[in-house]
Amino acid sequence: MLKYRMVLGFRTMKRHSNKLILISVILTFSLLISAQYAAATTRKELLEEFCLSNQHSSGAFLDSPSGVSNDDNTLSEFTTYANLFILAQIDPDLEKLDDAGIVRSFLRDKYTQFSDVGAGDIQQVYYAYFAGLIIGVNYTEEMEQDASRELLALQNQTNSGFGSLETNIPSIIETYYAIMLLNEFETINETDTSAIGDFVFSCWDDTSSTFTSSPEGNPSLVDTYFAIATLFELDLLNSLNTSKKEAVIDYIGNFYFNETTYMNHFGGYGIKTGIIQSSLLYTYYATQTLTLLETELHPETLTWVLARQNPYDYGFCDSSSGSTDASSSAKLSFYATKIILSFDENAFEDARSALMSEELWQLETSPWIVAGIVIGCVFAFAGIIFGIWKFKNRI
C-alpha cells in the first residue's frame, strides 16, 4: 500500500510538473512574441511616424519636430515636399495626415505667389508645385501657363540660363528646376533647349574636370549633379563625350569612403580633407549622378544609408546609428529615401520581404520591455523549480 501511494505521488508530481513546464513555456513564448510586436516596428512605419510628427498647423511640414516655423531652413516648400514624398512612398493615399486640406491650401498659396506676381524663387515654386501634385492640389492649365510665363521671364537672354528674380544671375541649379517645371507644363518648346544645353556646357571646368554653378564658378559635387540632371532632362546627355563622363565619375569617386579605417563613414560620400565627414547630402548627389551616368553603385553605400536611420526619433541623420545626440531631418530623410529607391525601387512595398519592412527595435522603450521579458522569464522558471520542490516535499 505504501509502495502504491509513493508511485501514485510520483505520477501526480510528474503530471503537475509537466503542466507547470508547459504553462511556463507558453508564458515565456507569449512574452517574447508580445515584446516583438511592442518593441519592434518596421523601418518605414517608424519613418512615417517621424514625418507625420513634422506636420505644422500652417499646413507646411517642418524639417524636424523641434524646428522653428519662422525659419526657412526648418519650414519651407522643400521640407514640405520632402515629408510628403516620403509619406507617399509608404502610403500613396496619405490617409494618416491630420488635415490634407490645409496642406493643399498652403502649397496652392505658395505656388500662386509665383504664378500670379513672380514672387519667390524657382526652387520654391518647384517644390510647392510637385508637393501639390503628391497631395492632389488642382492646378489649372491657366495657373500652369501663368507660372510658365514667369519662368521664361527669368531666362537670361545672353547665355539662356535661368536665375532667381533676386539675383538675376543664371545658375545650373535654377536652370534645372526651371527645365523640370517647363517640361511638366509642356511649354519647354517655347525656349531654345540647345541654347540651354550650351549654357550647361559652358559651366564645365577643365581644371577640376567637372561642372561649376555658373561660368567661371567653383566646381562642386552638387553643381555636377544638377548639370548632369539638366542635360538628361534636355535629352542632351549623350552630347557629353565619354572622356568627360569618365572624368565626372572619377571626380565623384574622390568623395567616396572606401577605407575600412573610417568604419563610421565606410560606404558613404563626403568630405575627406580637414574634418572627415560623410553625409547623406553628398551621398545623395553622388549616387544620383552615378545613376544618371549608368554607373553601378557600391552595395556598401546602401548599408551605410540604412545605418543612418535614427532609432530615437526614427528619421535619418548624419550621425551613426544609436547616437543619442543625433537629430533627424526631413531633408536628410528625403535624400536617404531617394538613395534607397535607387538601389531597390520596391523597397517601400507592403511585402514582408521588402527592404523597408525590416523590423527595428525602438530604443526609447525597449530597455523597459527587455527588463519585463527578463523578469517574466525569471518568474516562469522559478515557478517550475518551486513547483517541483513543493510536490517533491509533499511526498
Image (tube, helix red, strand yellow):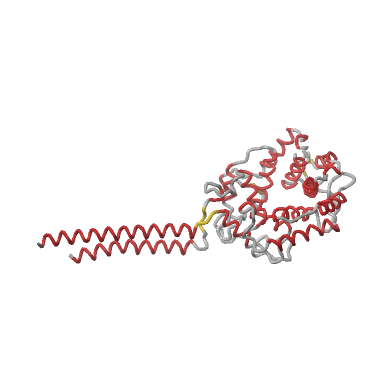
- Numbered circles on residues, count: 0
The location of residue 380, given as percent across then percent down, is 34, 62
Q: Quadrant of the N terminus?
A: bottom left
Q: Quadrant of the C terminus?
A: bottom left
Q: Nearer the viewer, residue 68 or 9?
A: 9
The residue shown at (41%, 60%) is: 31
Task: Give the residue at the far top of this rendering.
Answer: 242
The residue shown at (65%, 58%) is: 329
Let me know if residue 276 appears in the view. Answer: no
Q: Is residue 372 above or below residue 190?
A: below
**The image quarter in which residue 239 lies:** top right
Let me know if residue 357 appears in the view. Answer: yes
The location of residue 164, given as percent across then percent down, is 83, 53
Task: Give the residue at the far left of this rendering.
Answer: 1
The location of residue 202, given as percent across then percent down, is 82, 41
**The image quarter in which residue 23 lies:** bottom left
Q: Nearer the viewer, residue 179 or 317?
A: 179
The location of residue 286, given as percent across then percent down, is 67, 45
Please state if 301 lies on the left or on the right of 189 as rendered: left
**The image quarter in which residue 328 lies:** bottom right
